[in-house]
Amino acid sequence: MRTRALAVVAVAMFFAVSSLPAAEGSYRRLGRPGGWANTRAGAVLDGQLYTAEASGSFYAADLSSGVYRQIGKAMFADTQFLFASAGSLYSIEKSGSLYRISPADGSYQRLGQSGEWANTLAAALLEGKLYTAETNGALYATDLSSGVYQPIGGADFGNTQFLFASEGALYSIEKDGNLYRINPADGSYERLGQAGDWSGTQSGAVIGSYLYTVESSGALYSTDLKSGVWRQLGEPVFGNTAFLFAWADGIYSIEKDGSLYAIDTGSASSSVSSPAVPALPASPVSSSASETSSAAVAGNLAFAFMGAWKGDATAYEKSAAYEEAAKANLGFAQGLLALIGGSSMKVGLGDITVEVMGEKAGPFAFTVITSEGNDLIIENQDGPKKGVQSTVTFIDSTHIKVVEGGNAAQAMYFVKQ
């Protein structure tokens, strides 16, 4: 009975929401699940996400759809950093060499001397120059037209983890979690915010004067770079984020499972839903029209599903589904009532973990097939019910009903905590 119960509850996990307004921290998946599982570095240029893969392949993905295509030959297996500026891409390789890359065909040209950037800890592009913090603590500025570099300031940057650029200034997050504003002219700096506030930062990206960071707790934060004041966006569901990228007013993440997401930052001018970029030519790997449209609907509404849910036995007992089940088999209906009351689930970004009568299962991956009104048709991607479709109905913003395979008598009910 317990094995069956876990299987029944698991199918309730694989969906996103369908009828509530978008909110800060909500997200939608782009392209194929796991399509970026081997990404080693990435950068955004003109609405395209360029990524270097472990295989050496180089890809460009349209950030309006997630459709991607390969560019050039598989020559990028050793890429550690990737940047975009003024119509070109730039990489720093494991060898420490710096290259300019054509986004059109993947051709490249070395800048400067071979191996000059071998000790780079973190880097950022600002006004046509590449700024790098090195293991010896030095901060360097490299002219991207020639590859010529020069040191700036003292050897104060040996503990730098992340380097960002915004509105004429550089910003660093150090290993101790401190955030600093750096003057690119002389390397002088000042601390922002409270000491150690960014100690859990895993990745980050900048839009205008705001720094968006994902923390080890799974929380997404927005920091005002003028004051150092930060605030959390949405629920802490980003614990598996590997990379963050910015384009226009949108934030995009690649998760550890290789899936690409667009994240709503809450900006009134946010372009997360549909960045104004040209579509890529047809490629061997593309999302169907139904998948793209369903993902867009689910993404705008997924915020309502993030967080913790508990089985709603009261709602089930009052439902027509319970009456039908009781008529057919009273013992089974009462058992399902107890099962629902002892069930809970926790929803993260792209996966869900369930607990039934003290026994945990998951996390399980999910995908959206289509949506109609307040209903979503979803399909399990793994677990004991892989490939099974279910209908999820949002009764309101905090109550849902899940029906597996059209069997209304076994509907599951949940209430948000």
Image (tube, rainbow, N blue to C red):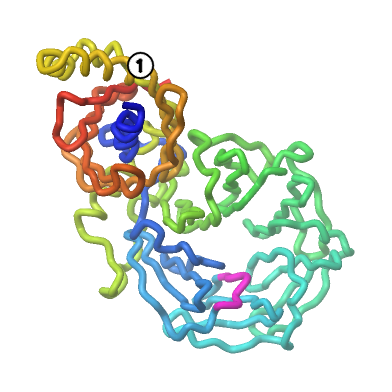
- Could you say which is closer to the camera, residue 331 or residue 48? 331
Question: Relative to residue 221, is residue 143 depicted above or below?
Answer: below
Q: Quadrant of the N terminus?
A: top left
Element assignment for label 1: helix
Q: Quadrant of residue 377?
A: top left
**Position of residue 325 measured from the top left corner of the image (x, y, whole percent):** 15, 18
Please name the residue shown 34% across and 36% down the image. 10
Q: Quadrant of residue 228?
A: top right
**Position of residue 82 measured from the top left corner of the image (x, y, whole percent):** 58, 71
Q: Is residue 219 visible?
A: yes
Please name the residue shown 32% across and 31% down the image. 9
- Report the residue marked by disc 1: 341
Q: Which residues are magenta?
A: 77-83
Q: Quadrant of residue 313?
A: top left
Question: Relative to residue 123, is residue 403 depicted above or below?
Answer: above
- Give the amino acid at mark 1: Gly
**Position of residue 350 measured from the top left corner of the image (x, y, whole percent):** 41, 45
